[in-house]
Amino acid sequence: MVRIAEIESGSIAEELSLEIGSRVVRINGERVRDGIDLTFMMSETNFELETISAEGAVTIYEIERDPGEQVGIVPAPDTIRECANKCVFCFIDGNPSDARQTLWLRDDDFRLSFTYGSYVTLTNLGPKGIRRLIDQGISPLYVSVHATEPEVRERLLVNSRAGLIMDQLRQLIEGGLEVHTQVVLCPEWNDGIHLDRTIEDLRSLGPSICSLSIVPVGLTRFNIDRPVRLLHASEAAAVIDQVDKAREWALTEREVGWCYAADEMYL
């Protein structure tokens, strides 16, 4: 369910005397899981909205609105889904022990991917979660792929579900979604022939894989060589060559650059 944080002035919600602090439980009899559900379900012009007050009173509202007219419910922020991976290159592990609390949040939430462009790994989504993305048309998504070979990705993310990535991407694409992808490049982990394989695998999925960004791993004195090290200049140069090669075919075949190396790769 979703808590009502604000009611917009002059809105349908204000006219119906919905209360801040009440929770939206169901719309048209379907459970409302989060703010995306709320927005998706309230897109209808006629619907039944069930709320429960802070005191536990249940109220059902019959809502009719004109196309484009806002209901006026502003939901409270959803609880963020945290990461279930133990990535060998996790930036959180590079924090000093006295870093502020907000820097310790390991988010891996498809809702933030959709609304803010945050990259997610999809390891915390099962078949129902993937189906939801497709049913609600949550697109584009931003996915941290890192490697397409199952054993390589499982080793990087330290998660047995990490090897499902190609199947998950195929399902999303076949469901009509678009995906931007990312590789955090770790020397001797997912570079060289592994990067070539990743580029080719993502290319094979077609134009619904909208882009591939390749970023060198970022480390601090708190996590360098534990167990990942920084790239050497020669390794970065080799990656740039791989990116240039991928960009050549992408520009020829699709008229877009498609594959991009982060600025840090050139430094």
Image (tube, rainbow, N blue to C red):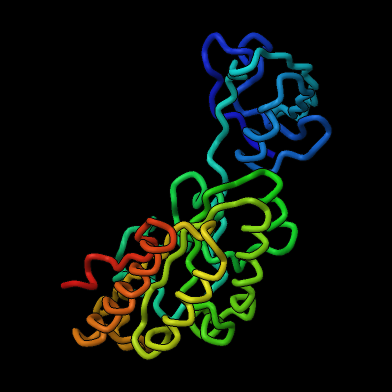
Viewer-proximal residue among 207 and 15: 207
Residue 22's x, y, as percent? 66, 28
Q: Residue furthest right?
A: 29
Q: Residue at x 58, y 20 (%)?
A: 72
Q: Residue at x 38, y 84 (%)?
A: 191
Q: Residue furthest left?
A: 267
Viewer-proximal residue among 50 and 152: 152
**Would you place residue 4 above or below residue 136 in this image?**
above
Q: Residue at x 59, y 76 (%)?
A: 162
Task: Identify the image quadrant of the N terminus.
Answer: top right
Q: Quadrant of residue 168?
A: bottom right
**Would you place residue 165 above or below residue 225 in this image?**
above
Left or right: 234 with respect to 145?
left
Residue 231's x, y, as percent? 26, 84
Left or right: 105 with respect to 161?
left
Q: Residue at x 54, y 53 (%)?
A: 178
How many marks the image carries: the answer is 0
Residue 6's x, y, as percent? 54, 24
Viewer-proximal residue among 165 and 38: 165
Residue 160's x, y, as percent? 63, 81
Task: Identify the image quadrant of the C terminus.
Answer: bottom left
Q: Quadrant of residue 14?
A: top right
